[in-house]
């Protein structure tokens, strides 16, 4: 697999789509908000980018949930593997593309996640026990479950040990076939954009999206009956535009605060990617200002 990551406004999607057209690939989105339908302008889906020289490039994990719901990392990981395996079965090349570092790292590393709900009664009964006592209890539960899910790094604190016990207890009482989600081998490409250029592109793109009807998009979601707090939950554009449309802030305040928030978001994305490098991922950074042909050639050289 090829992974293309980078901060917002770095131009990831056009690169992924062009690459897909040249190598027979399909794009898997790694964006935590593009999963929602009718949230197009604010999430920057830019679906026109997936048409290359008149050909539609297949894309996945976009427009798969209704707005107002809360999609999470566990669901993404399951959905990713379903799509990834389907693309591979059809002899195509998966290209993971996005800026949600947590999602990217989870599927590349093969995080073992569980949708197990909290058991407050169990938690209360474990409160006050030492880490050694909790570890012993966990060891016994693992033996009963035949589980290799939790190792010593999972239980380096009482809080983690209690969560591990909670999961093992749930699995003991609710046996289900465990899905193994292995790490995915991938060449990782980072689109490297100069900070000042990134800031300029973010500002210009925000103005363009407002001109394209982003306010109307959010108003339409409110008109559907989606609660304001449900949209504010999605952050950034949906937070500040909802506050504007519900008369909490003025238009100018909305623009200024949103612009600052997007700049801060891009900085956090880069912090996450640098953290991935410290955690052992090799990211091959490519200059965002290079001509498209040069970018594609560099990626193909790294991939082959």
Image: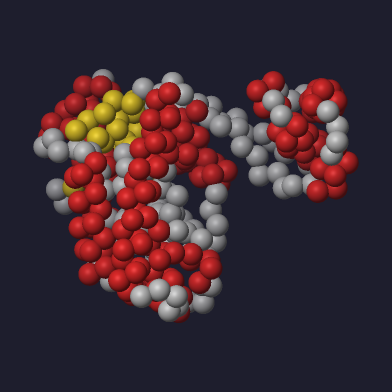
Please identify the quarter of the rendering in which residue 129 is found.
top right
Q: Is residue 171 left or right of residue 59?
A: right
Q: Vertically, is 132 above or below 18?
A: above
Q: Is residue 138 left or right of residue 246?
A: right
Front-most of 25 and 173? Answer: 173
Residue 182 appears at what percent x and percent y? 53, 27
Please identify the quarter of the rendering in which residue 152 is found.
top right
Residue 112 appears at what percent x and percent y? 60, 32
Residue at image x 45%, y 75%? Answer: 248
Which part of the image, by quadrant, shows the C terminus?
A: top left
Residue at image x 66%, y 44%? Answer: 115
Q: Is residue 8 left or right of residue 165?
A: left
Residue 164 appears at what percent x and percent y? 73, 33
Residue at image x 79%, y 26%? Answer: 131
Front-most of 86 and 237? Answer: 237
The answer to whether residue 93 of the structure is visible from this angle is no
The answer to whether residue 262 of the structure is visible from this angle is yes
Front-most of 272 and 71? Answer: 272
- The outermost residue toward the right is 125
Residue at image x 35%, y 37%? Answer: 270
Q: Vertically, is 113 above or below 214?
A: above
Numbered label tally: 0
Front-most of 230 and 174? Answer: 230
User: What colour scheme governs how the chains and residues are painted in the rendered image of this protein?
Assistant: secondary structure
Residue 148 appears at what percent x and percent y? 70, 23
Which part of the image, by quadrant, shows the N terminus?
A: top left
Please identify the quarter of the rendering in which residue 282 is found.
top left
Q: Is residue 181 left or right of residue 26?
A: right
């Amino acid at each position: 697999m090829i992974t293309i990551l980078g901060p917002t406004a770095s131009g990831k999607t056009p690169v992924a789509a062009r690459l897909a057209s040249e190598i027979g690939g399909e794009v898997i989105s790694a964006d935590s908000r593009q999963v929602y339908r009718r949230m197009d302008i604010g999430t920057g889906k830019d679906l026109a980018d997936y048409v290359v020289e008149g050909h539609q490039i297949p894309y996945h994990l976009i427009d798969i949930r209704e707005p107002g719901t809360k999609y999470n990392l566990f669901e993404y990981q399951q959905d990713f593997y379903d799509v990834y395996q389907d693309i591979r079965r059809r002899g195509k090349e998966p290209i993971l593309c996005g800026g949600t570092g947590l999602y990217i790292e989870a599927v590349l590393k093969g995080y073992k996640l569980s949708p197990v709900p909290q058991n407050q009664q169990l938690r209360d009964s474990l409160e006050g026990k030492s880490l050694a006592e909790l570890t012993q209890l966990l060891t016994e539960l693992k033996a009963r479950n035949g589980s290799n899910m939790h190792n010593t790094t999972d239980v380096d604190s009482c809080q983690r040990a209690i969560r591990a016990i909670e999961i093992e207890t749930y699995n003991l009482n609710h046996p289900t076939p465990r899905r193994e989600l292995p790490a995915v081998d991938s060449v990782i490409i980072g689109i490297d954009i100069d900070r000042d250029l990134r800031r300029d592109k973010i500002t210009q793109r925000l103005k363009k999206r407002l001109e394209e009807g982003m306010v109307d998009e959010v108003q339409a979601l409110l008109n559907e009956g989606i609660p304001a707090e449900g949209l504010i939950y999605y952050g950034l554009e949906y937070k500040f535009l909802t506050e504007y449309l519900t008369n909490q802030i003025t238009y100018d305040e909305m623009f200024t605060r949103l612009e600052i928030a997007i700049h801060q978001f891009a900085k956090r994305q880069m912090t996450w990617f640098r953290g991935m490098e410290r955690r052992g991922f090799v990211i091959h950074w490519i200059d965002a200002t290079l001509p498209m042909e040069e970018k594609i050639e560099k990626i193909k050289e790294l991939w082959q």
